[in-house]
Image (spheres, rainbow, N blue to C red):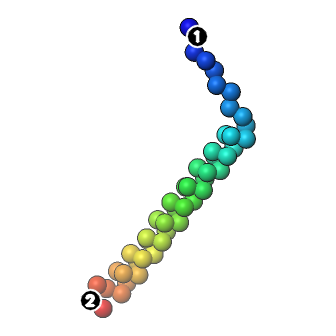
Amino acid sequence: MEGKRRVVLREVCMERSVKSNRCQETTLNMQKSAEVIVAVFFSEGPNQ
């Protein structure tokens, strides 16, 4: 038997890419926030 081909609508592909982009943006924002928190911690020092 031949493998079945799956037809995927363009809208479905676009929706997935939009969700993927949002996830990447969220991850980048979290990384930026963490970098700022670490930078503030080190500039103030742990003994303050």
Q: Residue furthest left?
A: 47
How far apart marks 1 and 2 lie (CA) works out to 69 Å
In the drawing, does residue 3 fall left or right of residue 15?
left
Where is residue 38 drawn, in percent x and y? Answer: 38, 75
Dot 2 corresponds to which residue? 47
* Residue 13 spot, x, y in % from top left: 67, 40
Element on which disc 1 rests? loop
The N terminus: image quadrant: top right
Q: Residue at x 69, y 44 (%)?
A: 14
The vertical placement of 5 against 22, above or below, is above
Residue at the spot 61% in from the left edge and 18% down from the top edge:
4
Q: Quadrant of residue 41?
A: bottom left
State the SS at label 2.
loop
Q: Contact (CB < 8 A) between labels 1 and 2?
A: no
Please give the name of the residue rendered at 43% of the width and 70% of the height, measured from the top-left corner.
34
Decide which of tag 1 and tag 2 comes sooner along the chain: 1
- Count of residue discs: 2
Identify the amino acid type marked 1: Glu
Q: Which of the numbered marks, if any, corresponds to residue 15? A: none
* Type of amino acid at the residue the image marks with label 2: Asn
The residue that label 1 is drawn on is: 2
- Decide if residue 27 is on the left or right side of residue 15: left
Check the image and name the residue furthest to the top.
1
